Image: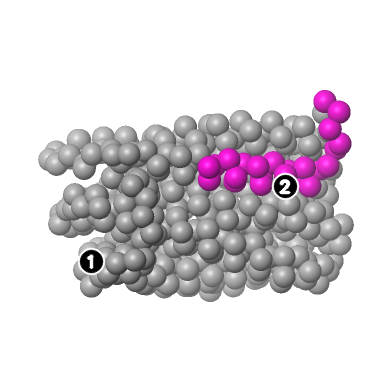
Amino acid sequence: MARPANIETPPARLRSIVTLAAPAIAALLLQTGVLWADRIMLGHFSATALGAMQIAGPIEWTLVSVASAFAVGTLALVGRAVGAGDHAAARRHTTISMVVAVALGTIAMLAAYALVLPTLHLMFANTDAAAEVARQYLQVALLAAPFYCVGVAGFAALSAAGDTVTPLKIGVAVNVVHVGINWLLIGGHWGFPALGARGAGWSTAASYTAEALLTFAALSRAGLPASLRPFRWPFGDAAGRDALRALRRLSLHATSERVVYHVAYMAFVWMIARLGDDAMASNQALIAIEAISFMTVEGFATASGALVAQELGARRPERATWVGWASTGLAVLTLSSFGLLFLALRHQLPALVTPRADLQAEAARALIVVAIAQPFMAVGVVLGQAVRGAGATRLALFVSLFGGFVVRLVVTWIATSRGFGVMGVWMGSTADWASRTLLLIAIWRLGTWRDATRELPAG
């Protein structure tokens, strides 16, 4: 895709945000549909299988999320190069990111098999049945961690170059495959064995692999700003080594942020596990419901981060500031609408995920808190990604450390200890998003994020 046009009027700038965000939102909502399909199939297979995903899901997410954190640097560097019209640099950053993706994904896979799977029963000793089912899922799903990282890096490069349509097309194809394999292997159809969560693991691994291959093919098209063609080993000259140093510098804080967040999140998961298998299953129903709004706001965040990076690369910091505010405003309006929907349908939505009336009632009570969290989550996700797109990964690390590690854990511990159950879990989450909102608004207003990439090697 060509260098972004010089957009002069606010309505035209809003259209540029929506144009970039809409395919990203569609792709992410498609993923949400797949999450719903997963949880519905597992929930009807057994409550233990559904509850096991409260253990397996966060562990899988933690490992691949930390391993792919470098893609934050990919977004900032490719976006900056595209905004400056330097397509050679954009291709160099993309190629380096793909090589790094394979290496870090492999490390994550090996770490999981060496350290995580052998200790799963120790970490979740009071949920033996769910922990064993979670282990069966992770044994298979994490085989594809390198492919997951390749897909994330490729999507970041495409989005930074202004192309969110290609990831949508890839997502459609991959998710059709995912749901089909789920249907065959979770409950057992057309002569296939009923594998439950292990079957979901096989479908996840197949999806990650297909996504990586299709993303690699998309980036191999000639003429793209972020194309891998003509391929050349990126570390053989000074420009390539400078680009690697730039990626490493941005990724250091981004990876630290992910580590901090996920250490806190695993402690958060442990607090939920203390409440028992039923609470974990109820919480999984809530996660599936909130995923609709979370994936929507991630689409706005994709647009925000990419456009901020492009505007800074084009030396238009005022427009970068405007993009951050406008993207956040659109997200707040959208997620506030979701909050009202969650309130209105709080008794009906949980019934779509689990057939058990007691779990539905517990989820319905907590949905009130989920609804309140929506505008805060909009600010936290979108403005946070704008800060990362600017390359200010150190500031993003600070916000995540305070909100995710301090506020979320303290409030969740107090609320669950005082008998609020699953609702207390979501009180902690809401307090986290509210604290991020205050910090990120202050950071964006101060404007120090504008200079974050100026001292990086040229790459």
158 lies left or right of 407: left
Q: Nearer the viewer, residue 89 or 268?
A: 89
- The part of the chain drawn in magenta is 190-213
Whether residue 95 is visible to the viewer of this picture, yes or no, is: yes
Q: Is residue 188 above or below residue 148?
A: above
Secondary structure beneath disc 2? helix
Whether residue 200 is in magenta: the answer is yes
Q: Residue at x 39, y 34 (%)?
A: 165
Identity of the amino acid at label 2? Gly
Q: Is residue 427 above or below residue 307?
A: below
Inter-mark Cα distance, 1 to 2: 42 Å
Q: Nearer the viewer, residue 182 or 7?
A: 182
Q: Residue at x 24, y 49 (%)?
A: 87
Identity of the amino acid at label 1? Ala
Q: Is residue 7 above or below residue 251?
A: above
397 lies left or right of 206: left
Q: Are marks 1 and 2 in contact (CB under 8 Å)?
A: no
Q: Residue at x 59, y 62 (%)?
A: 106
Residue 179 is situated, as x and y percent measured from the top left of the image, at 67, 33
Q: Nearer the viewer, residue 74 or 376?
A: 74
User: What residue did someone put label 2 on?
Assistant: 201
Whether residue 372 is in magenta: the answer is no
The local crowd at label 2, few if under 14, some if 14 to 19, many if 20 or more residues have their Cα within 10 Å, is many
Residue 458's mark? Answer: 1
Residue 178 is situated, as x and y percent measured from the top left of the image, at 65, 36
117 lies left or right of 11: right
The local crowd at label 1, few if under 14, some if 14 to 19, many if 20 or more residues have their Cα within 10 Å, is some
- Residue 146 found in image quarter: bottom right
